Amino acid sequence: MLSYTICFAQSDFNTDNIDNENNSDASNSDQDSIQGPEIPHFRHTWKWMNGGVYLQNIPLDTLMNGIQNFNPIFKKSISNTYLGNFPSPYESNIFMDRNNVQDFYPLTYIRAYLFLPEDALNYNTTTPLTQLKYFTGGGKGQAENLLSVLHVQNINPFWNVGIRYHLLSGDGRYAHQKSTAYNFSFFSNYERERTVLSFFINQNNGDFLENGGIKERAEITDSTEIDSENMPVWLNEYHEAQNVYRNTNFNFQAQYNLGNPKEIIVGTDSLSMDTSYTYAAKAVFNFKAEGNEHKYKEKTINHDFYPNTYIDSLPYTYDKVANQIYDLSAKFVLNEHPTYKYLPGVYLGLNYKQEIYNQRTAYDTTTHIQSFGKTNYTGMHLTAGLFNIDTSALLNYDLSAKLCVLGHYVGNFNIDGYIIQALRKDKSSLLRADATIKLQSPTPFLDHYVGNHNIWDNDFKSIKTIQVEGRYINTRLRTELGVGISNTFSYIYFDTIAAPQQTSKTLMVFTAWAKQHFRAGNFHFDQKVYFQKSTQEDIVSLPAFSVYSHNYYQNHLFKKALELQIGVDLFYNTEFYADNYMPSIMQFYNQREFKIGNYPKVDVFLNLKIQTAIIFAKYEHLNYLLKRNGNYFSASDYPINPAIFKFGIQWNFFD
């Protein structure tokens, strides 16, 4: 394949912190090229884009900058509505950053805690790599923990295997908030001559205790002296309400290159070159199987909290939804030409998808008879695309299209892509445009659901979305300026009683943003500002401004044996009607009683890097100690956690 694209981890413009020793190998060299007695240490990590069409090099995250913000939702968006504790369901307050609706809808608002096939990297490393992370904070009964173990190694020059374990857990600072989310994965990739294979299997599990939020908002807004763990909540240990989910994935991809190999030369860094090969065409096959299950369980029902209890008031009731997804696709790809840099690659394929839902299908309020059953959804899709990702070209693009021609979702389509125009030969300055046009049937969950506290039966129209974004990026000046417009027709939202509704109005959201990294000697000021405006604020309320201000002093000490960062993070957004949260369906919904925001959350941190070990210490929500502004809510009835001290270590081992 002819592709060579570098993506920096964590920081948008922080190229000073790139681990050059470990990432200088990021070329697309064929596995054959690493044979021989003199094998230099290198690590190559990448993803296959568009289901195996081309690869994109993505260096493993080994940076120190930003390690103190280990809550994954704040790595995806600078402002979020969430339940305060870690981990917990969430939605981004930046509309363009909101998660795509998952095939299994209950997973939509916990996407950041899942590890799915599209998140996994492929590896080629001449020496085994082990990465350990342990982050923690809070005392007994208040702890928040992250434990992550990654190990990868080459079995031979062509075959790599790896395992990954990732655990997030939090006891919760308010009553009955303990939560756990973890995943375990085994993966492998093989490449030799014409054959490329990759394999991935994993399981995601989670268990969130639900407290329904605090009963009296005045205990927060009036800055009372009641400890957080003693504040009354709607659902406590007597009710034992909890959401439990399980997600299992199996993914297999096979590629076979066709035609005569052509030798190409690519740069691995500024001083060295490497030999690789590209082929005229290839065939790609993907198979994915996924199993999902979600339960809402409760020991005793609080009728003051839930306005409706339809099915059962007896102890130990629960709602359950499960599904299985099978996805098969095949593509034929004509690769880019290695000589004519502006001649694009093209592909054409077929995709078959089957979804099987197993759930409660009906409940008769008169006879109290329940019905359970399975519903089957299938679709056959045509897929096609056009791409040019040759890094020696000043113009790059990736355009893809998908159309359902048979089955339940017939007529659904998705067209998306990007175009990048470099303004300088070194690509330090560029313009980028992204666009999406899609027509999608609502997920089955939104059409039909029968639960103990929530029942609906809808016949919603398909949802049409047109979204366009444009941005200017200058890596030398460390600047990004962008604007985006999203138009959604027949938008579906959850109203003030947590029931899905579809509006006939067009929802348009305008977004503008600026990112700028200033530097004065060893002092760094990294600023991100978003502005948003929704045309239907009664349906989607958003903060007008959201800010993340990351400020630190950075230096190397003891003859560069130690790298140090010490600084202050500030998170802020203007007031808006943040959504409330319904535990029984793990769903955010509209409320127009209380505004939150106009409250800065301030953290102070110290990061240290010694060789391959990174250590951090942080005092989170420092300004809580002042208690001059008691409006520190992260969702309508859910306050941000009180101040907490956290610390942790990330250690990379290269044998």
Image: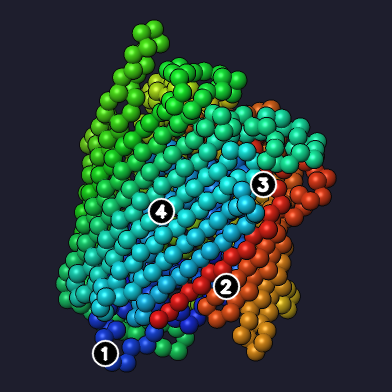
The image's mark for residue 208 is none
Q: Quadrant of the C terminus?
A: bottom left
x, y percent for residue 54: 32, 65
Q: Name the residue tied to disc 2.
A: 614
Residue at the top extreme? 366
Q: Name the residue tied to disc 1.
A: 36
Q: Name the residue tied to disc 4.
A: 183
x, y percent for residue 498: 53, 26
Badge nearest the viewer, 1 or 3: 3
User: Horizontally, is 405 left or right of 474 in the view?
Assistant: left
Please name the residue shown 22% across and 62% down the image: 254
Inter-mark Cα distance, 2 to 3: 26 Å
Please name the residue shown 36% across and 80% down the image: 127
- Vertical placement of residue 2 versus 179, above or below: below
Q: Name the residue tied to disc 3.
A: 641
Earlier residue among tags 1 and 3:
1
